[in-house]
Image: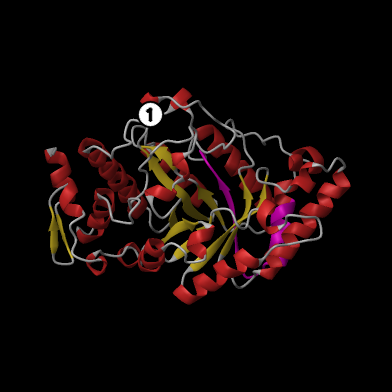
Amino acid sequence: MQKSFIKGIVIAVGGFVFLNCSSVNKVKSKSDVPSLKEAFKSDFFIGTALNTAQIEEKVPGAAVLVPKQFNAVTPENIMKAEVIHPEWNRYNFELSDKLVAYAKKNKIVVNAHTLIWHSQLPQFVRRIKDADSVRMFFNEHITTIASRYDGQVYSWDVVNEALNEDGTMRRSIFLDKLGDDFVVEAFRLAQKAAPNTKLYYNDYNIEQPKKRAGAIALIKKIQAAGVRIDGVGIQGHWHINHLPLKDIEESILEFSALGIDVMFTELDLSVLPNPRDIVGADVNQRAAYEAKLNPYTAGLPDSVQTQLAKSYEDVFRLFLKHKDKISRITFWGVDDGQSWLNGFPVRGRTNYPLLFDKEFKPKPAFYSVIALKSKGK
């Protein structure tokens, strides 16, 4: 075991001293594990993304862990258009209603995700050819869904991933048919339909200078139109070998200077080799499977656990430094077994990007994050 790892996570929590990777998982009971939401309750919301089975409480480990560890949830897929609005005149609110009920029962706030996104659209939208019909869908979709959950969800990702890497607007059905102002119009409609809900723009890689500049210009455009935007979500799909701390800090400062909240909305730190230097979360990026790209099928070596724990400690130290500007940190998944990174950008891999392993046990990275609060940092 590396000395730096021992120094990093030797802490006393709940009467137990954790000395190394194996001892982390020797906690006597789940009740002995500290709570993220309690540790950071004076700083920011601690959230997680939930899949359908977890919302329906069909996963026993998650059913116990989520209410203890998190005070904010985001649905992975159930509020995306292809699920919640599968046909022109038909909405499916069954699962989203279950999410709202689940959150209310457990005193958790909901960040609803997402009203407008170019991906995961229902087939009927993909077949539309004329601009008038796209606008009709756009208007009715936002108004119907946002108004239904106003006052029941805390916030909406109104528009998701509307920018290219260079900060220009991404080509999409909405840009092509509705023009450059579709983001402003989406927020205008959401503002009217959901006056009691916070409204956010969400994207990946917007901590990077060029894309950040595009996001800032977009937010200023919304504000200049007299339309409400309450915050920006930086997704935070990063790699332990390339954690852009300087860019992250600059993005916190620059977005906050616009008078809006800053969130980190889909946080995970990949530990696997990155094929073709793929960066971010563009779901259209794919690479072929090779054994060398999936090196940890039998478990994560202690040296990599060390690096993961140190990376999470570093980024959370930065979050705490700017806690007055940050309102939420959401992990994109409850446990490693659920993580989308097991299938992106290479299908069939075993990744370990979160704070809880696939058996819902806290990892060394969990304790490195908790330790920041026990040290008063």
Residue 363 location (% of width, % of height): 27, 51
Q: Residue at x 59, y 72 (%)?
A: 152
Few, some or many C-alpha atoms within 10 Å of disc 1 (few <14, some 14-19, many ≥20)?
Answer: few
The secondary element bearing badge 1 is classed as loop
Name the side, left or right, on which 41 lies relative to 236.
Answer: left
Name the side, left or right, on which 64 lies relative to 91.
Answer: left
Q: Is residue 192 magenta?
A: yes
Quadrant the N terminus occupies: top left
Q: Quadrant of residue 230?
A: bottom right
Q: Nearer the viewer, residue 111 or 31?
A: 31
Q: Nearer the viewer, residue 12 or 343?
A: 343
Numbered-mark total: 1
Q: Is residue 377 visible?
A: no
Q: Is residue 36 magenta?
A: no
Amino acid type for the residue under numbered disc 1: Pro
Q: What is the residue that sits farthest to the bottom in this orientation? A: 105
Name the side, left or right, on which 247 lies relative to 261.
Answer: left
Residue stretch in magenta? 185-205
| Colour theme | secondary structure
Quadrant the C terminus occupies: bottom left
Q: Residue at x 17, y 42 (%)?
A: 5
Residue 269 location (% of width, % of height): 38, 42
Question: In the rendered image of this protein, does residue 106 appear above or below residue 81?
Answer: below
Q: Residue at x 23, y 37 (%)?
A: 301
Question: In the rendered image of this protein, does residue 332 appear above or below residue 62?
Answer: above
Question: In the rendered image of this protein, does residue 72 appear above or below residue 288?
Answer: below
Residue 343 location (% of width, % of height): 48, 38
Q: Which residue is mark 1?
A: 273
